[in-house]
Image: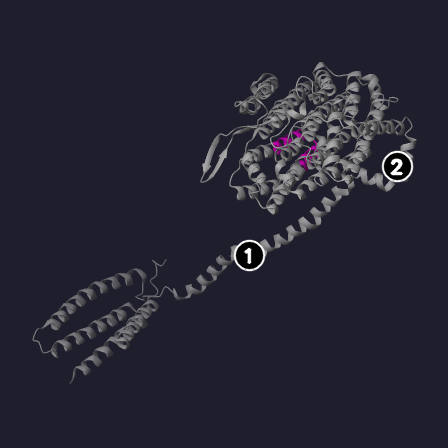
Amino acid sequence: MQNAWLIPLFPTVAFVVLALFRRFLPGQGKWLAIAAVMAAFIAAWPVLFDMLGLGVGPYHFPREWFSAGPLSIGWGTLVDPLTVAMLLLVTFVSVLVQVYSLGYMRHEVKGRRGSHVADDPRIGWYYAAHSLFTASMLTLVLADNLLLLYVAWELVGLCSYLLIGFWYERPAAVGAAKKAFITTRVGDVGLLIGIALLVAHTGTFDISANLEMVEHGELSSGITTLVALLLFAGAVGKSAQFPLFVWLPDAMEGPTPVSALIHAATMVTAGVFLVARLLPLYEASEAARYTVASVGLVSGLMGATMALAATDLKRILAFSTMSHLGFMFLALGAGGYTAATFHLLTHGVSKAMLFLAAGSVMHALHDETDIRRMGGLARRMPITGTAFVLGALALSGVPPLAAFWSKDEILVAVASGLNPLFLVGFLLAIVLSALYMARAMRIAFFGEHRADAAHAHESGWTMKGPLALLTVCTVLVGLVALPLGFDGIGSFLFEAGHGPHAFKADAVWMPVGIALALAGLGLGWWLYDRALERVDALRTRFGALARTFERRYYLDPLYQWVVDRVVLAAGRLIAVFDRRWVNDVGMDGPGVATLAVGTRLRMHVSGFFADYGLAVAAGAIALALLLWLGA
Amino acid sequence: MTLLHFQLLAAALFSLGLYGVLARRNAVLVLMGVELMLNAVNVNLVAFAAYRDIPIATGQVIAIFIITLAAAEVGLALAVVLRLFRSHGSADVDAIRGMRG
């Protein structure tokens, strides 16, 4: 377990080798990248077994990098059940996504002798960025101090930028990459300030030490709240929560396996992980806790409604991710550490599978993503169809599939930890999430064939294999909630001070959850039938509402307006100040003044002997007078 | 004749010399101004020496030194002026500015 720091090392090495030498490696080094991430996946298991044998910890292995005065900067690891769960999830999804990419990243390449199917010309760089992405996320979950965590956090942001903008020949991809980078950066500023503020008050970067101080009440409640909220701003940006979710739908411009990676394992889960890791900080402040829960609920509802209006298959999934991450924040706000973490895992697996299924569809339909041009795909692509349907059912919360168990946990947590308003909102969100999944499933995979969908076909084994494996996992992963062989995931995720929190099957909420999920699915199935008449009628009736969902709550134009009218206007004002004052007065001023003084002073330097002589004489006389009068 | 008379004479001579040095443009006249100033100093030295009670001829000795040096200086300076006049065609001190920065 003390060697857990080796896990991120594998993909890091792969990144370095690929970044430098990919031209000299067979297949531009893609096999090396897969081998490295596979090694990381295998290396993560001993950590789990150690933990099962020795107890849940947390285990802290500090290692010093350097120290400056009283401040010590380290690269140590903090291994607790959350870390182990994330390690396994991240490496598992990364392996499958990389294998899947072998197939997905083979497409028509225009060569000198016509076009043929081959690897993407930049496949090596793709795998290099993938490896770095995985490595940064693994570092993030292992970090024992906030500085290392922040470094990994920014690396994750960088990798998302690189991969979303991987096809930089497309202007849309470039724009999406920049948008993702800048939007998350807005939140990261909060994170950085939050870390600085916390460290200024506690004097250490160490996470456990900081949390201990918070728990012992050594920080004033105002500072605690402020720090918690600032750190949460970073999480909001990274996890695409309201109001910083605008980058998420655009990020779909990247290759689909990248979306799977971003949504299931790396990037967006980082925000949830951060809040889960620092949960004592949020529990110490009622205001912060309620902010987290409110943002989560609002994002959950917004994501669900936008998913309901979107017609792009990948964007539906993206909004669904936003919605489910919102549920996780809601659970964290309710104090449901286990519920949130568990949902992170089950959602990660299900969403990775859904994205891979969507990628498979796109691959078959020549990058078509509009669900209205699909239809009847389940018959053409049985494996993809099965996967998508199971994923949809799982995310809707149908037992015994993955997300059912965790959603039930969240329901229990919300019912017991927050005020009933949140509960009502969450119940509505459950119905909505079942509804939009039913819609996507019904329109894309059932009904008659439309347009290109008639000659769709399954892809090669590299794409089918990971998909099938993830499908099996989606079915089975939820079962770890049950006390089979060990005490269930609840007690595994037990964190010191929170008490054993085994899976709770609540007699009231479980049936309610199932009933709502089934109701949503049934409603969706009935609404989005072949003719779509009912939906069209609803759409005309609630036109304004539908438009609001489609335009993503007008946040994009709002931000555009803010950028144009506020940021740029302020920028212009400052530019004028810079030109008129800083430049003209501040910089040029001394120069101009010196020049003017010099020009005037030059007058006495005539070059005539007589002038100098006169000056000498006058000086001598003056001196003499001075001596005479002074004496 | 008191010491004051000699001092006034010396001052007048010195002022005339200074005026010549500053106001004249002809190098020869400038040199004459310098001579006047030197001789004003000589007058001062000798007068002070003569009006002192101690019979040591320090002032007179220094005056003779100055006369010697002035003779040498004028010899050298006139040679320079001559060369300048030959090369520049004039002895105007302001016109000779070939080394001006």
What whole-number distance in Å separates the C-alpha atoms at marks 2 and 1? 59 Å
In the image, is residue A522 part of the stretch drawn in magenta?
no
Residue picked out by circle 1:
A584
x and y, in percent, of residue A111 in the image: 68, 21
Name the foreground residue: B53 vs A127: A127
State which quarter of the image contains the N terminus of chain A. Answer: top right
Q: Is residue A254 visible?
A: no
Question: Which of the pair A293/A471 is nearer the observer?
Answer: A293
Question: Residue A193 in the image: x percent, y percent?
Answer: 58, 43
Q: Which residue type does callout 1 highlight?
A: Asp
Vertical side of A211 occupied by A349: above or below: above
Toward the top, the furthest residue is A461
In the rendered image, residue B101, in percent from the top left (x then y), is placed at 37, 57
- On the question of residue A388 being in view, the answer is yes
Marks 2,1: beta carbons within 8 A: no
Q: Are marks 2 and 1 on the same chain?
A: yes
Q: Which mark is residue A539?
A: 2
Which range of residues does the magenta coloring cover? A156-180
Query: Which of A76 and A338 lies nearest the eye of the viewer?
Result: A338
